Image: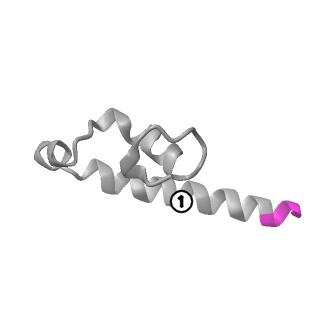
Amino acid sequence: MNTLTHIVTELTRAWRYAVARREFQRLDAAALRDLGISPSEFDSYWAEHHGLADCTRRRIGC
C-alpha cells in the first residue's frame, strides 16, 4: 500500500469513528438502558465490531 492510500484509509477510519461516536453520544440514558450498554463501553464495542479486539459480546455478531 502506498503512503497516500494509507493516509486516506486512516483518515476514513478516523472520520467513521468520529461520526459513530457523535451519534452514540446523542443517545439518552433511556436509550442506553434499553440497549443494555453504558456510555463507557463505546470504544470496546467499536473495537470488537471492527476486529481490533477479541469479541466478548454475542450481540456484536463476531
Residue 57, by quadrant, is top left
The location of residue 36, given as percent across then percent down, is 22, 42
Kindly report the secondary structure that dominates the magenta region of the rendered protein: helix
Closest to the observer, 32 or 7: 32
Looking at this rendering, what residue extends furthest in the top direction? 40
- The quadrant holding residue 5 is bottom right
Q: Position of residue 35 (x, y in %)?
A: 22, 48
Pointer 1 residue: 15
Q: Position of residue 42 (x, y in %)?
A: 39, 42
Magenta highlight on residue 2:
yes
Q: How many marks?
A: 1
Crowding at label 1, few (<14), some or many (≥20) Cα neighbours within 10 Å?
few
Magenta segment range?
A: 1-5
| Residue 10 located left or right of residue 33 | right
Q: Secondary structure at mark 1?
A: helix
Report the residue at 59% width, 49% height from top.
Answer: 51
Q: Looking at the picture, tell me which residue is in the foreground, 19 or 32.
A: 32
Q: Residue visible at 16% across and 42% down?
A: 33
